[in-house]
Image (spheres, helix red, strand yellow):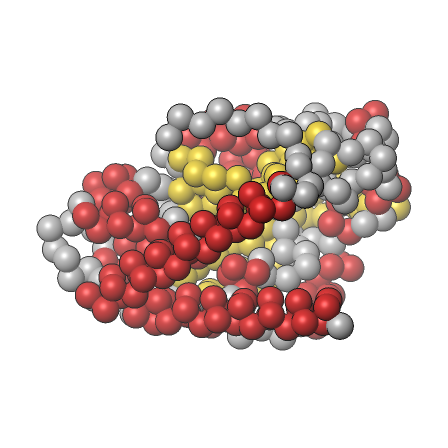
Amino acid sequence: MIKKTYRTLVKFSSASYSKKINHLFSLLNIEDGVNLIDVGAAGQIIPRWKRVEKYVNYYGFEPDNRSRKELLAQKNNCNRYQLDENIVSDKSELKEIHLCKAPMTSSVYPPNRGFVDLFAETDRFDVVSKEKLNATTIDQLELTTTDFIKLDIQGGELNALKGAEKTLKNCLGLEIEVEFLPIYKNQPLYADVTNFLREHNFEFIDFLRICRWERNNIYTNMGQAAWGDGLYLRTPEFVAKNIIETDTIKRYIAVCLLYNKIDLIVSLLDQFKDKSIVSSKFTKRLLRFDKRLKKSKWLKERFNNLTKLFFFIDEEIHLFN
């Protein structure tokens, strides 16, 4: 009964949040939606983008036939939707993929058994077969507009970025799964990805998630930091200086809105003499939305402090602010 009530309340809260986000999107009056490339599309469209899918022009890549069949069987309400079966890399060629027992662990890199076998449930990395599949690059798509790229290809992210250097010139941001430790043999790690993107004027903004593995349990989210989802964006200063198309600026605002980076939106708008880029109604709603987000964060922090009275966890964090 308690679990059912909890789920109902969470569902209601999520629906309310989605309604607010969609209303803000509608007030932006973006001409033809926001353009998302999803490399490693297994599962479904990531939740924050799924929430506004009617505004999304979606181009996904999923070479694993098992996952691709599931995706094609799902319904979507995207403005446009296309799914590609190619591997994404730094050049066009036949490329071997290691298909693992758990489809979402498959990679062009072989699993690093010397590392992953230190942890629990490593059979998900068992290679059940190897296939040579066609690889392409993002640049070869020659898409007229790419606003955002999501990469989740188990160590192959840097290769995909190297094959997208032309596309990156007009891109506004990326969400990338990055590994901190060598889960796959010879794979690039977080620092390699971040340094490459810095050279292309993208700034690391935040970790959206950090996944930690314990030696005897990978589901507690405690233990050693293994991988995370990193958010990389153009800065408001870069956008104000280099982008003149109003609709592109609105799409940047939409991306920041999806990731709750309201301060970046406010900073960007402050840099324009022309205050009509967005409507006054949007600005008022945005500030109200930001106020609610901050209130929600404050309540979560107070609740966490309350739980420490009963379940104290030693966290030695030195705050200077």
Q: Is residue 50 visible?
A: yes
Please tell me which residue is depicted at 73% across the width and 59% down the height of the picture: 67
Please tell me which residue is depicted at 73% across the width and 67% down the height of the picture: 3
Q: Is residue 143 visible?
A: no
280 left or right of 177 in image: left
Please tell me which residue is depicted at 71% across the width and 61% down the height of the picture: 68
Choose between 167 and 126: the one closer to the eye: 126
Q: Quadrant of the C terminus?
A: top left
241 left or right of 73 in image: left
Residue furthest front in the image: 309
Position above or below: 111 against 297: above
Q: To which quarter of the image does residue 255 belong?
A: bottom left
Please tell me which residue is depicted at 52% across the width and 59% down the height of the picture: 48
Q: To which quarter of the image does residue 249 belong?
A: bottom left
Choose between 216 and 242: the one closer to the eye: 216
Choose between 278 and 248: the one closer to the eye: 278
Q: Quadrant of the N terminus?
A: bottom right
Give coordinates of residue 171: x percent, y percent: 39, 47
Give coordinates of residue 268: x percent, y percent: 25, 47
Give coordinates of residue 18: x percent, y percent: 48, 68
Q: How many numbered dots are placed on residues in this image? A: 0
Give coordinates of residue 17: x percent, y percent: 47, 66
Residue furthest left in the image: 273
42 left or right of 191 in image: right
Q: To which quarter of the image does residue 114 belong?
A: top right
Position above or below: 300 against 25: above
Choose between 319 and 90: the one closer to the eye: 319
Position above or below: 60 against 1: above
